[in-house]
Amino acid sequence: MAYKRSAMMEERLAGNRERILEAARKLVAAGGFREARVAAVAAEAGVSTGMIYRYFPSKGDLFVEVLSAAVENEVGILREIARGKGSATEKLAAAVASFARRALRGPHLAYAFIAEPTDVEVEAARIGDRRKFGNVFKEILKAGVEAGEFPAQNIDVTAACIVGAFTEALIGPIGPTRRARQNEAELVAAIALSCVRCVGAAPPAKRTARSRKI
Amino acid sequence: MAYKRSAMMEERLAGNRERILEAARKLVAAGGFREARVAAVAAEAGVSTGMIYRYFPSKGDLFVEVLSAAVENEVGILREIARGKGSATEKLAAAVASFARRALRGPHLAYAFIAEPTDVEVEAARIGDRRKFGNVFKEILKAGVEAGEFPAQNIDVTAACIVGAFTEALIGPIGPTRRARQNEAELVAAIALSCVRCVGAAPPAKRTARSRKI
DNA sequence: AGAAAAAATGAATCATAATTCATTCAATGA
DNA sequence: TCATTGAATGAATTATGATTCATTTTTTCT
């Protein structure tokens, strides 16, 4: 007859699962999917490789969960900004800046969930995640267009462009190198400004001398 | 004592190398790096696997060459646009549209270049290639800013944003998701327009879509 | 033609990393 | 306490695919 798990035991098991997820997240953040091997995750979590498989059907499933948790969290933050107060332009700039600031702190994680390709399973999951992500920006865009703040445009394309733009600027090799970006705040501001321009909004007349009428 | 290779023999050997490269390119274009195994390349080229290694030190080297040839070609086209005539705005729109059109035509190759993961060796090469890419756009940006056509800005950041923007916008249609593509011309126009706005140029009055220089 | 050199072959080997499972260890309940 | 179930281990297995190399075939030269 089945034994009942004591509360303490129950808790420990949940803790194991949590520790595995956390270890996986940490390894991805540190070195991308490529370096997050099952054995490494197990070592990081302080458990055996076999244990991973008690909690997750496969490596793919584990990473799908890591990915979706990170995206869920990120989307939550951005959506709050999107639904908060302020003009669409302000919200767009705030959302981009918010993401950028966090990404600069854990670049590999941002890269992994935006861009780094992996096995089919994870790739498939990312497709959904990516969409969720774009949707937040679409929300802002839609509101901005309806308010007459942005010109009419193909919202799907622009949303993708925005996501691509700040992503590449943050982690790609074209943007300022790590050494060259002495000033994080300035970089974040420059990226946000590019994104704001990308939707055709009149940029807030600040330091950028020539603001254009659109 | 070494034998001298006859002209015909020489030619055949060069032909072998070429056929291997071409087979690799074809397989990548057809199914991405993932499906371009050494054995498959050999079969496609009609040679043995061992032969690959007579011509290329490793699989990585082979694919680096495939990639860089494609990029060289692409960058050449874009640079020509960048150095041709027209305003910076027009050149920017033309360059983006030109790339996008080709990408939509050879989706896998573009995808492989843009995003698909591979071994470190190829990944490293791609980073360099991406930079070359960004440089073309920096050229256009610099000229545009100097001409007073674009507002003063952080060129490194904007160039990265542009490359990221059209790249990301294309991944939807060319990536593994590849949904039914509606109207190619319209998509290309929308992407180019977003990129033009991104630099802060006043979008050309009406006919942005059709100013196809190349 | 025939010996030496070079090219080509592809099965065998090596490398990497995920997954399994026989075994050990710990918790449960009589 | 002790028999039983469930949890945990990690070495062995499996899977995939690149790379090697002993052998065969072709080319070159006398």
Image: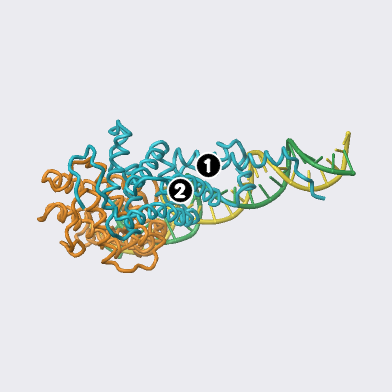
Chain colours: A cyan, B orange, C green, D yellow
The residue carrying mark 2 is A75
Q: Tell me: A14 left or right of B133.
A: right
- Check the residue under mark 2 and report the chain it is in: A
SS label for mark 2: helix
The image position of residue B180, as x and y in percent, is 38, 68
The image position of residue B138, as x and y in percent, is 20, 45
The image position of residue B168, as x and y in percent, is 34, 54
Q: Tell me: B62 left or right of B139.
A: right
The answer to whether residue A213 is visible is yes
- Check the residue under mark 1 and report the chain it is in: A
Within 10 Å of disc 2 (Cα), the crowding (few <14, some 14-19, many 20+) is many
Q: B32 or C28, which is in the foreground?
A: C28
Q: B132 or B42, which is in the foreground?
A: B132
Name the quarter where the C terminus of chain B is drawn: bottom left
Kind of residue at badge 2: Val
Q: Residue at x 14, y 55 (%)?
A: B80
- Given the current orientation, which residue lies at the most extreme top position? A182
Q: Tell me: B214 left or right of D21.
A: left
Estimate the spatial distance between the alpha carbons at disc 2 and disc 1, rounded to whole Å: 20 Å
Q: Nearer the N terminus, badge 2 or badge 1? A: 1
Q: D5 or A207, which is in the foreground?
A: A207
Asked whether disc 2 touches disc 1, contact meaning CB atoms under 8 Å apart, the reply is no
Q: Residue at x 25, y 53 (%)?
A: B195
The residue carrying mark 1 is A24
- Picture quadrant of residue B145: top left
The image position of residue B71, as x and y in percent, is 25, 53
Q: Are marks 2 and 1 on the same chain?
A: yes
The label on residue B176 is: none
